[in-house]
Image (cartoon, helix red, strand yellow):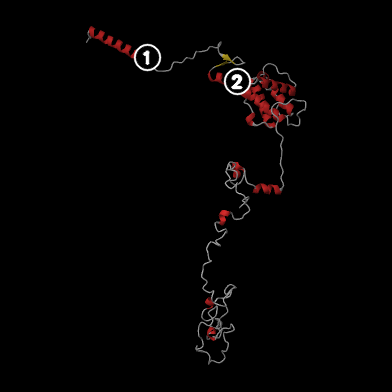
């Protein structure tokens, strides 16, 4: 069945209209940022000393390395290397050291035999191997691993500042070597000389007992003295005469003595009006003050103990008619009751052991 011509035209018009609306709407809703970067060709690009163009992160890193570069230090390093090796460095410092031949000669001049013989081949891997041998020699001479540069930093001219730092570290160590000649210049800061301290046992013992810095605190004492500023205090007793150093020698202060003028309770109570109940009794002067028992302490029986308190005159002595017991038990010996029926003060003889079999 063939469609009508009018319907085909209407359908085509609707399709074109929808496509136009979709294109306009998409363009209006596109919020992607538009880059303002301009592509730089090879001719206009920034290049390294070897003619390699720099783009992106390489360009930023090269800019940072260039900012750290110190031409004066490079000149000092050049003069130091030429003085020790006796070789003349041509071109830039990176170009002169790139092959590693000069570096190997430098290490061998400081200490003969510490570095492998450098290869004179112009192949990149051979030159990088020379640089690696120089770094191994630096480690043997005492340069720390954190002071060593990466081979690529020198060979590809990535970071000459790290190369100079390694040369400075080598210069510090080399100045202490026994083979270092006096006429040679120095490069880098001088290493401090070792200063070993020796203390006797008495000093060490005092140090162990001394207060630590942490214990002393910011005041410098092991107590709280000096923490409070008393320079502006007002001395309320400064105008009073006769109180200089009062209380500073351990004596009782006026406040401690109180209104009665004593450091104790003596004189606090007025005893002048007390009634002496024994004052009219004769013969009791000083009685009880010399350690003797008082009349009250002796009691009605006249003794300072219980002796005589009980009447024993009418006691019945139940063993008085028994002969042979005079003084028995009075001298510390065992009584008849204590001895028992077997006649001993112990269990000896209580059992008959005559028929026991000695196994």
Name the residue located 28 percent from the left edge and 9 percent from the top edge: 13
Residue 17 showing in the rendered view: yes
Name the residue located 52 percent from the left edge and 76 percent from the top edge: 296
- Does residue 334 lie above or below 122 as drawn? below
Local crowd at mark 2 within 10 Å, few (<14), some, or many (≥20)? few
Per the image, label 2 sits on a secondary structure element best described as helix
- Does residue 214 lie above or below 46 as drawn? below
- Does residue 178 lie above or below 75 as drawn? below
Q: Position of residue 18 (x, y in %)?
A: 30, 13
Quadrant containing the C terminus is: bottom right
Q: Position of residue 31 (x, y in %)?
A: 40, 18
Q: Residue 67: which disc?
A: 2
Q: CA distance from mark 1 to mark 2?
A: 44 Å
Q: Position of residue 145 (x, y in %)?
A: 64, 31
Front-lying residue, 177 or 117: 177
Local crowd at mark 1 within 10 Å, few (<14), some, or many (≥20)? few
Frontmost of labels 1 and 2 is 2
Front-lying residue, 163 or 304: 304
**What residue is shown with label 1?**
27
- Does residue 346 lie above or below 152 as drawn? below
The answer to whether the residue labelled 1 contacts the one labelled 2, judged by CB atoms less than 8 Å apart, is: no
Which picture quadrant has residue 16? top left
Q: Position of residue 19 (x, y in %)?
A: 32, 12
Per the image, label 1 sits on a secondary structure element best described as helix
Residue 132 showing in the rendered view: no
Q: How many marks?
A: 2
Lower position in the chain sequence, tag 1 or tag 2: 1
Which picture quadrant has residue 125? top right
Quadrant containing the N terminus is: top left
Name the residue located 58 percent from the left edge and 54 percent from the top edge: 254
Front-lying residue, 277 or 137: 277
Which picture quadrant has residue 112? top right
């Amino acid at each position: 069945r063939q469609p009508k011509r009018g319907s085909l035209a209407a359908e085509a018009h609707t399709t074109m209209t929808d496509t136009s609306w979709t294109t306009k709407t998409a363009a209006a809703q596109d919020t992607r940022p538009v880059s303002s970067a301009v592509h730089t060709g090879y001719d206009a690009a920034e290049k390294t000393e070897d003619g390699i163009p720099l783009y992106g992160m390489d360009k930023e890193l090269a800019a940072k390395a260039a900012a750290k570069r110190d031409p004066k230090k490079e000149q000092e390093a050049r003069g130091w290397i030429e003085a020790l090796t006796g070789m003349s460095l041509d071109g830039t410092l990176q170009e002169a050291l790139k092959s590693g031949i000069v570096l190997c000669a430098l290490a061998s001049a400081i200490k003969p035999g510490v570095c492998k013989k450098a290869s004179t081949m112009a192949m990149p891997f051979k030159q990088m191997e020379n640089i690696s041998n120089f770094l191994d020699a630096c480690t043997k001479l005492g340069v720390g691993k954190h002071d060593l540069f990466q081979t690529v930093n020198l060979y590809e001219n990535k970071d000459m500042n790290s190369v100079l730092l390694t040369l400075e570290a080598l210069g510090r160590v080399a100045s202490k070597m026994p083979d270092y000649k006096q006429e040679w210049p120095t490069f880098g800061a001088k290493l401090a000389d070792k200063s070993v301290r020796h203390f006797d046992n008495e000093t060490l013992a005092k140090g162990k007992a001394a207060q630590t810095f942490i214990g002393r605190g910011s005041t410098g004492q092991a107590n709280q003295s000096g923490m409070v500023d008393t320079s502006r205090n007002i001395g309320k007793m400064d105008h009073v005469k006769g109180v200089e150093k009062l209380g500073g020698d351990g004596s009782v202060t006026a406040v401690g003595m109180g209104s009665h003028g004593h450091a104790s309770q003596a004189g606090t109570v007025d005893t002048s009006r007390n009634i002496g109940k024994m004052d009219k009794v004769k013969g009791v002067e000083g009685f009880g003050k010399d350690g003797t028992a008082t009349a009250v302490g002796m009691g009605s029986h006249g003794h300072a103990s219980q002796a005589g308190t009980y009447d024993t005159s009418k006691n019945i002595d139940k063993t008085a008619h028994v002969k042979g017991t005079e003084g028995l038990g009075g001298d510390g010996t065992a009584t008849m009751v204590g001895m028992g029926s077997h006649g001993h003060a112990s269990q000896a003889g209580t059992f008959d052991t005559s028929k026991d079999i000695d196994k």
